């Protein structure tokens, strides 16, 4: 009840405030001289805008005309029937020998590279490791590879290799070994293979 | 917002300010501008007069309208034209105050004790001066309000929403709200004292 009682004058005063504000506003209005001044500026700015607008319109019109002309020319060209057939006959008189010389040179270079490749391959074959199984231990060693190649090593060589620590002394018959060859294809070491040989 | 404006324009017989400014930006038609000016000039002038003095308000009005003439394309269709116009006017006024060192913004916590200040002002002036009419007392009290409170109150009276007031005065919505509250409290006190 009390709140309602307070709210009534509050809203009354607020509406009074609005009324007084509007009264005050009616006393302070923008005069006609201000409007004249603003419109003068508009006229000045408007003339520039009109000029620019005209230039813009002319540019757009010119661009449109140009575009239509280009399209028309293109269409005209497309519609024209193809009446002229251009023929060109090529007669072959001879083949220059220079090409065959170049072919020969290329062939020679190819053969040379192939020979080099074969040499490198042979060298690789001679200097590599082979896996084998130690099959005989008495009076020299016999090593059998997966390709059934038998490599016989004399006892003297075994002893020599042992002296050079190139042979593992603990090897026994049936062990898988790795035979290491040097560039010249000579055996330089026999070591036990970490994995058993499987052919 | 722009869609709603478009729909409103579709059905309304008189053109809205938003439609007028957009069309004016496209055509620079003098008649459109005149219509726009007639719709808003009094509101802007009164707001600026209340915030400064008639002479400065006139200058700022000219500058504001000049900007509308020169750069109408800057108006964003997402908001009301009048809010944009008041923003330009208010910014120009603040710039002018800063140039002449007349502008002293309220401190951060001014809104907290703003009412106390206003209360003192209104009561003391009422005691000292006998106004001929309630209108005079109101005018006097309004002009005695701190700048921020006065502008917030005026903008509300001009029909702006809290979001628009906050945007125009570059403050938060809550700040705008409290400024209006303090301004109204001070004015109410003046009116009550006058009636007593």
Image (tube, helix red, strand yellow):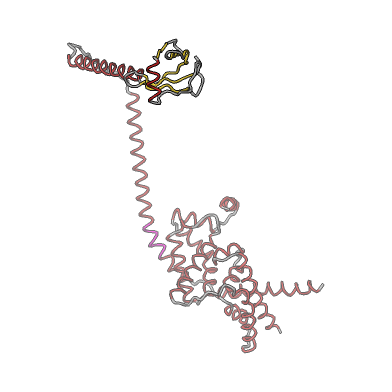
Q: Residue furthest bottom?
A: B128
Residue at (40%, 26%) from the top-left corner? A165
Task: Indicate the quadrant containing the C terminus of chain B: top left, top right, bottom left or bottom right.
Answer: bottom right
- Quarter of image, res A117: top left
Q: Is residue A46 in the magenta section?
A: yes
| Along the line of sight, the residue nearer the viewer: B10 or A139 | A139
Q: Is residue B30 above or below residue A37?
A: above
| Along the line of sight, the residue nearer the viewer: B95 or A55 | B95
* Magenta portion: prevailing SS class: helix
Magenta-drawn segment = A41-48
| Along the line of sight, the residue nearer the viewer: B31 or B113 | B113
* Apparent side of residue A182 relative to residue A175 in the rendered image (left or right): left
Residue at (36%, 53%) from the top-left corner? A52
| Along the line of sight, the residue nearer the viewer: A165 or A107 | A165
- Quarter of image, res B183: bottom right
Residue at (82%, 72%) from the top-left corner? A1
Q: Position of residue B166 (x, y in %)?
A: 58, 65
Q: Position of residue B61 (x, y in %)?
A: 47, 69
Q: Is residue A56 in the magenta section?
A: no
């Amino acid at each position: 009840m009390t709140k309602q009682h307070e709210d009534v004058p509050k809203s009354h005063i607020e509406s009074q405030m609005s009324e007084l504000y509007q009264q005050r506003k009616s006393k302070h209005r923008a005069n006609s001289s201000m409007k004249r001044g603003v419109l003068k500026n508009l006229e000045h700015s408007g003339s520039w805008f009109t000029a620019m607008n005209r230039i813009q319109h002319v540019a757009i019109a010119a661009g449109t005309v140009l575009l239509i002309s280009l399209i028309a020319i293109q269409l005209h060209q497309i519609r024209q029937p193809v009446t002229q057939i251009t023929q060109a006959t090529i007669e072959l008189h001879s083949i220059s020998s220079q090409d065959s010389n170049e072919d020969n040179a290329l062939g020679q270079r190819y053969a040379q590279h192939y020979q080099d490749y074969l040499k490198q391959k042979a060298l690789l074959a001679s200097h590599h490791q082979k896996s084998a199984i130690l099959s005989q231990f008495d009076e020299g060693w016999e090593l059998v590879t997966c390709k059934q190649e038998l490599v016989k090593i004399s006892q003297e060589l075994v002893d020599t290799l042992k002296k050079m620590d190139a042979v593992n002394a603990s090897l026994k018959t049936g062990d898988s070994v790795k035979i290491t060859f040097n560039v010249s294809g000579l055996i330089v070491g026999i070591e036990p293979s970490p994995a058993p040989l499987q052919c | 917002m722009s869609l709603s404006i478009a729909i409103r324009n579709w059905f309304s017989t008189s053109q809205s300010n938003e439609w007028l400014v957009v069309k004016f930006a496209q055509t620079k038609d003098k008649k459109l501008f005149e219509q726009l000016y007639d719709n808003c000039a009094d509101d802007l002038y009164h707001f600026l007069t209340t915030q400064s003095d008639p002479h400065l308000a006139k200058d700022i009005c000219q500058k504001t309208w000049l900007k509308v003439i020169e750069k109408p394309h800057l108006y964003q269709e997402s908001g009301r034209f009048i809010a944009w116009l008041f923003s330009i006017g208010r910014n120009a006024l603040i710039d002018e105050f800063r140039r002449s060192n007349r502008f002293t913004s309220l401190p951060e916590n001014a809104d907290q004790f703003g009412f106390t200040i206003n209360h003192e002002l209104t009561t003391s002036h009422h005691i000292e001066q006998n106004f001929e009419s309630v209108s005079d007392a109101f005018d006097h009290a309004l002009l005695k309000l701190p700048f921020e409170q006065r502008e917030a109150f005026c903008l509300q009276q001009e029909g702006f929403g809290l979001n628009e007031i906050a945007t125009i005065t570059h403050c938060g919505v809550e700040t705008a709200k409290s400024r209006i509250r303090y301004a109204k409290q001070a004015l109410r006190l003046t009116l009550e004292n006058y009636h007593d």
